[in-house]
Image (cartoon, coloured by chain):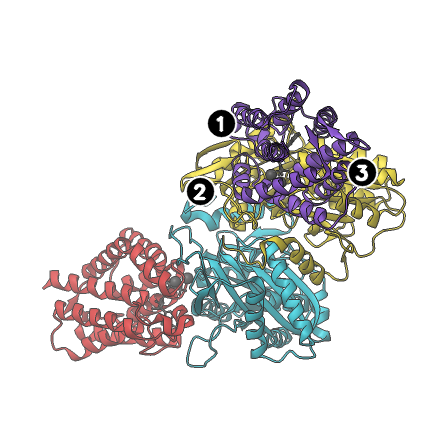
Chain colours: A red, B purple, C yellow, D cyan
Amino acid sequence: MLLSLKDSIDWMNIMNQKIQDNKQYLTKLDQAIGDGDHGINMARGFNEVVSKLSVTEYESVSDVFKDVAMTLMGKVGGASGPLYGTAFLKMSLASKGKEVDQQVFATAVNDALQGIKQRGKSTEGEKTLVDVWAPVVNFFQKEQEVLPNALINCASEAVEESKTIKATKGRAAYLGERSVGHLDPGSVSSFYLFESLAEVLEKGA
Amino acid sequence: MLLSLKDSIDWMNIMNQKIQDNKQYLTKLDQAIGDGDHGINMARGFNEVVSKLSVTEYESVSDVFKDVAMTLMGKVGGASGPLYGTAFLKMSLASKGKEVDQQVFATAVNDALQGIKQRGKSTEGEKTLVDVWAPVVNFFQKEQEVLPNALINCASEAVEESKTIKATKGRAAYLGERSVGHLDPGSVSSFYLFESLAEVLEKGA
Amino acid sequence: MKKIINDPNQVVQDMIRGMVAAYPSSLKQVPNATVLARKDAPVANKVALISGGGSGHEPAHAGFVGKGMLDAAVLGEVFTSPTPDQVYEAIKAVDSGKGVFLIIKNYTGDVMNFEMAAELAEAEGIQVEAVVVNDDVAVEDSSFTTGRRGIAGTVFVHKIVGAKAEEGASLVELKAIANKVNSNVRSMGMALSPCTVPAAGSPSFELEENEMEIGIGIHGEPGIERKAIASADDIAEEITNKILEDIDYSNEEVAVMVNGLGSTPEMELYIVNAKVHQLLQEKGIKVYKTFVGEYMTSLEMAGCSVTLLKLDDELKGLLDAKSEASAFRI
Amino acid sequence: MKKIINDPNQVVQDMIRGMVAAYPSSLKQVPNATVLARKDAPVANKVALISGGGSGHEPAHAGFVGKGMLDAAVLGEVFTSPTPDQVYEAIKAVDSGKGVFLIIKNYTGDVMNFEMAAELAEAEGIQVEAVVVNDDVAVEDSSFTTGRRGIAGTVFVHKIVGAKAEEGASLVELKAIANKVNSNVRSMGMALSPCTVPAAGSPSFELEENEMEIGIGIHGEPGIERKAIASADDIAEEITNKILEDIDYSNEEVAVMVNGLGSTPEMELYIVNAKVHQLLQEKGIKVYKTFVGEYMTSLEMAGCSVTLLKLDDELKGLLDAKSEASAFRI
Ligand SMILES: Nc1ncnc2c1ncn2[C@@H]1O[C@H](COP(=O)(O)OP(=O)(O)O)[C@@H](O)[C@H]1O
Ligand SMILES: Nc1ncnc2c1ncn2[C@@H]1O[C@H](COP(=O)(O)OP(=O)(O)O)[C@@H](O)[C@H]1O
Ligand SMILES: [Mg+2]
Ligand SMILES: [Mg+2]
Ligand SMILES: [Mg+2]
Ligand SMILES: [Mg+2]
């Protein structure tokens, strides 16, 4: 794979479209086991991201990721703002001065995952977006060639898996056992992120 | 007609029964154009009245009326408490030391009506219980012989009439035109009072 | 009906116990009466102030009992004026010999029950004066009808007359200041949802998802008009204009109260307040002080009222005076 | 959704305008930030106190800004922690050079955003310390989970740390007293109905006519258990016992807070308070002071929480100290 500057911007535009389309759905998921704002938060954030990207000239993927990070950090709030913000900041750093091929990207998402875990004091198996990022990182590190459909499958299996987990981090943790059987909203929005990426890679292929 | 001591107590017992049976209905009427407590108020008051009457020995109808008055005054509150209380106080005064035949009773209910109008600063045609008491007073003053059914008809026609009036006194007055088409709750409870009296007279006859 | 209560017929008694438990050093229950009084009542050399009415308007009226405001509140059943004997108990409990001043909201029931209590008290040689507050501009004012209701503006009467009484004013002086406040205060309310009297068990009226009631009172009674729900700005504008049409506040200073009726989040009250201030500013009316919160509620009704009080130096001073009432601390 | 608002996405901005309009002499908005600060901030020679979080908890947190309590409140979107840049703006606006103390409720989002702001501030040479309040006994306390939530007990932290800061205490001293309050305060809540985030437009959950949620938070999230609605006495007992099981208050003096979550009539809060006091008395726990009202709400949720704070002489003095915050006047 190779993520061009244009790809990275397309990625964010597609992501924003998915988030706006699924704003209500994400909010509904968050109402069930959280406070019902995840869709609103993500929609506000990615709406700002695409506005920002549309009026700025970029030189590199790293610069795009940096503005995405700063915009999410400053516009989302809640738990998801710092987490997505940190993720993109780490990806920006890891891709600085580089062409974003699969190896660079694998390192970037891995750094992002470590950043998320550190910020959130969280790890795998706690019913958070970490449970989608972790297998996706693994996918980029292990696969010889990134097949878009395989990426989507990997992320979507991870989301489904999140249903069966009992939450121990984030607001859903307050529900304890009652969180089992529900999808984690942050995992679903992370799924959209990787699904969007797959669609960009598909087009590029 | 002749209202014996026992009749006066029966009157209150029957009235209480009707009020308890129609508590919800009176409250519903008051919800439509008032504050939704008339049934609750009357039920609380007449429940106390029958308790009081059941444990007290009386010598005269006047004494019964006086206790009814004091009990309603002290237990009902709202607009209806002072009005019904005043009515029975006036009836007690008017029947003091007398056998309660039709003439005495006609004077008593008339005094009651005047007391209500003075207390409430109200008159006929304002969609209050005055609109039931006034024709009933007229009935007792005009009719040669009190036929229970005629009394019921007189009171029930007055209640129906209250529907068409626009309220200018009591809470319903705040609704202005919107009060038209609704029964006045105080008129309905007054109807029960005279219906109860008719039933007592019917039995006595 | 979903309520945090025990017995629907005991809510007032239970609440009174809860209030005395909360403020044992400042509040007492008058024995065997649904009356809450200042712990130190009767206060020597002070005319005593009493207000009250049906319950369900909390913090009115017991929340306004305290040094600088009321000496006692008489609590009726929910939305039902207290009976004359209860009001009379309150009068006896707080009179220091300088007389008692009654602050009555203009409802037939309140007026009659308080008047009868005043008659009882006067028969016992206690001097009693009263004001009947009628600040609600939603209601047609006519000498042929019941007249206007007393709603949230009553709280300003409590505050200002309370401060004046604390200064040692006579019954006659209190009556004068009470009339002055009453003639300078105007209110109007609206609701998005009804409320449920505990003993009734069902809501007072029904509103569709897109409807509101304008010109609502504080007893769950319907308002003067039902219409499509509007924005906070439009609601604020309709109410404010209705008040300003009624009396001329131009070039005056006013106190503003944005009062929640029970379940309206404070956030929404401040949103309304923003627009009220903007409108007043546009019309050259200066705001001296603002009160936003729940002062005169209607159980869990959703909605609000706006009150404007025209101020002069005397009223400003009295409004600013210290109050130790639990629900009105200045 | 029935709300008195203009644009669901502008409720926080509109509320801020309404608050500044209401208290222009004591409150100011930090330019271009969703931050409300004391008018006289930064206050020389005083450590500044900042709290905040998502909006929808009014009067928390901006209602607690004022002399004797907070120097600033940072307002996020409804139920959404404010972003680090907003918190950082607040820090810069109130720091007098003596440092800034953050009072954070224990939610992942709040903790992360406030921590990131603290990092930014420290990078600029501003000293920052913080307490993370976690008073909710409904939530399992475990180092492997998110831990307990911060709910209404946070208001006692604001009050007591605020009084201490007003006395001129250092950052270190404030951290110590904040930890002391946090380790002596416990709360738990319940709800009869959900609430609706304006931008979401639909209620957070649904409850049948005969159901209640026990162990509810303040963000419209479901509680720890759903069950049949109980009497006020039973509710008060369940919550009080859960708190008393958690820490030993016997033979101690406590402050009690019975907090309304939004649409519960004050009458019902006092009914709960009556039972809480009775239970404490039976267990030999003395009540020093009681607070009944809305302090930490969840929009228009119906329900309440009970908070107990164990007091010693130091805490009593600080609790009684003067506060000029609009929603907490002592
Ligand atoms: N400590 C954490 N570590 C990683 N992810 C977390 C953590 N806490 C929450 N999340 C993620 O954030 C999502 C919730 O985001 P959002 O609803 O926007 O914020 P909030 O929970 O503050 O309302 C959860 O679904 C979960 O995936
Ligand atoms: N001024 C008045 N004169 C005569 N009757 C009145 C007056 N005001 C109210 N009423 C009567 O009282 C009834 C309402 O009683 P109730 O609901 O018990 O008291 P409240 O109106 O105080 O809630 C009305 O239906 C009306 O018949
Ligand atoms: Mg959320
Ligand atoms: Mg009524
Ligand atoms: Mg009534
Ligand atoms: Mg949130």
Circle 2 SS class: loop
Circle 3 SS class: helix
Instruction: Decide: is D174 above or below C231.
Output: below
Q: Residues within 10 Å of mark 2 (few under 14, many from 20)?
A: some
Instruction: Give the CA separation, mark 1 to mark 3.
Output: 37 Å
Instruction: Give the CA separation, mark 3 to mark 2.
Output: 48 Å
Please tell me which residue is depicted at 72% across the width and 48% down the height of the picture: B52
Tell me if I can see residue C257 in this picture.
Answer: no
Ligand 1 positioned in quadrant: bottom left
Q: Is residue B67 left or right of residue B38?
A: right
- Which label lies toward us, 1 or 2? 1
Q: Where does label 3 land, which residue? A: C118
> Which residue sits furthest left?
A205
Q: Check the residue under mark 2 and report the chain it is in.
A: D
Q: Where does label 2 land, which residue? A: D6
Please tell me which residue is depicted at 56% across the width and 78% down the height of the picture: D246
Give percent across and percent down for residue C62: 70, 51
- What's under tag 1, amino acid-wise? Gly
Give percent across and percent down for residue D219: 45, 61
Q: Where does label 1 land, which residue? A: B181
Circle 1 SS class: loop
Instruction: Give the CA separation, mark 1 to mark 2.
Output: 36 Å
Give percent across and percent down for residue B106: 71, 24
- What's under tag 2, amino acid-wise? Asn
Q: Residues within 10 Å of mark 1 (few under 14, many from 20)?
A: some
